[in-house]
Image (cartoon, rainbow, N blue to C red):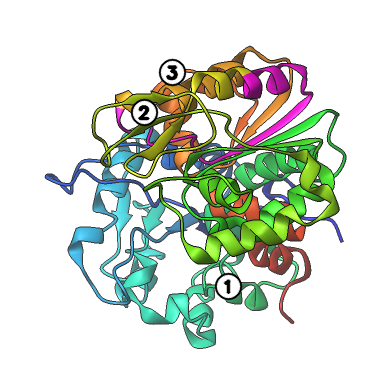
Amino acid sequence: MALSYIDQADLTDKVVIARFDFNVPLDKEDKSKINDTTRIDNALDTINYILENGAKKLILMSHLGRPKGERNMDYSLEPVATYLASQLNDDVILSESCTDRGIKTLLTLNESKVILLENLRFHPEETTNDRSFAQALSKYADIYVNDAFGAAHRKHASTYGINEFFNKKAYAGFLIKKELEALAKVSESPKRPFVAIVGGAKVSDKIKIIERLLVSVDSLLIGGAMAYPFLMAKGFNVGKSLCSDEDVSLAKKILKEKTAGKISLPVDHIGSTEFGGEATNIDKEDISDDFMGLDIGPRTVELYSSKIKDAQTILWNGPMGLFENDDFANGTLKIAKALADSNAFTLIGGGDSVSAVNKSGLASKMSHISTGGGASLEFIEKGSLPGIQALKFGLN
């Protein structure tokens, strides 16, 4: 069954409830200040479409942070309401809570067209996918829209359970449409050569996606702390580099597969005697006992860049080192530059990779930057997401 999108809905005089991902980073010192508005900006196409196509009222909902089911005003959506009002040039009323009795009164008033429900995760029922909570949310509206791709891999009340109460009245927004179209280019019929670049800290976190990618890619380039368990599994010394016994054992399992020949590992490193200490070039695979690897070295950058140059499809998830520290950012930034210079379809799979691309100043050169790291990887691994499946088939 095909997914129904918001532009297929008749919104005339309808009350619409829409789930977005407004989980934006707030300033640590000033919680009223948003450090990066990208996730809200990505929602504006869908919000404006709903408002411009006859909807009587629009109720927005989202989570922010992890308040652990309690009302914690450090995680209030008030800064989001303020920013949205400035972008929409209209009032955005923030409710006291998701189940505030005043919401039904607001729905009868002509003045306020846009209502933002306070943080969904102030209610423990959201993350437990509580049916009664989902039903309470559904009673506000005639039509449900999900455009929270970054939360579509969660079976939560607002992304999953709520679909039960909107039979043939549930739609995906434009951001989800854009994400799925981009992911299809990687997961369904990628143009070849198809190169995946995987970094980050732990093999155990990405074991399933690595196994899935090895079936479909032509080359898998591994960097960051992810590389050290693989190097140790191949018999190299990794010194004091981040490397758990569990990850080494998982790496050994992967290296025994027939597809292991597709894997490229660092041939040199930038390291230090302590985490974030003075940077030293280590011109070989082995890292001596008193050093730890913190970035890929220049020969590895050259090796990986040559594979990237020939690619037609590239997926990148995870930095090549401690890129937040300028002394260990070169590998990650050079890989970003190689992607920007390539003629391939480039998909940046969320998380730290997005921060790295933004730091490089090359974000505009990438074909698609996913708004959901976990969601995009799970989609590639499994072919769908619970929130997407629920939109397609409902929960009746």
Farthest residue in the top direction?
341
Q: Which residues are magenta?
A: 303-325
Mark 1 residue element: loop
Say which mark, if any, is on residue 155.
1
Mark 2 residue element: helix
Compare residues 150 and 251 and report the one nearer the observer: 251
Q: Amino acid at mark 1?
A: Lys
The residue tagged 2 is 328
Q: Amino acid at mark 3?
A: Gly
Magenta stretch: residue 318 in it?
A: yes
Q: CA distance from mark 3 to mark 2?
A: 17 Å
Mark 3 residue element: loop
Image position of 201 (left or right of 5)? left
Q: Nearer the viewer, mark 3 or mark 2?
A: 2
Q: Earlier in the sequence, mark 2 or mark 1?
A: 1
Compare residues 137 and 220 and report the one nearer the observer: 220
Q: Give yes or no for contact between labels 2 and 1 (Cβ–Cβ under 8 Å).
A: no
Number of numbered discs visible in the structure rendering: 3
Residue sitting at 62 percent across and 62 percent down?
250
Q: Nearer the viewer, mark 2 or mark 1?
A: 2
Q: Earlier in the sequence, mark 3 or mark 1?
A: 1
Image position of 268 (left or right of 250)? left
Q: Can you give x and y, in whole percent of width and height, for residue 291 in the image?
A: 34, 39
Q: Amino acid at mark 2?
A: Phe
Q: Can you give x and y, in whole percent of width and height, for residue 237 in the image?
A: 49, 45
The residue tagged 3 is 361
Residue sitting at 66 percent across and 42 percent down?
179
Q: CA distance from mark 3 to mark 1?
A: 35 Å
Q: CA distance from mark 2 to mark 1?
A: 38 Å
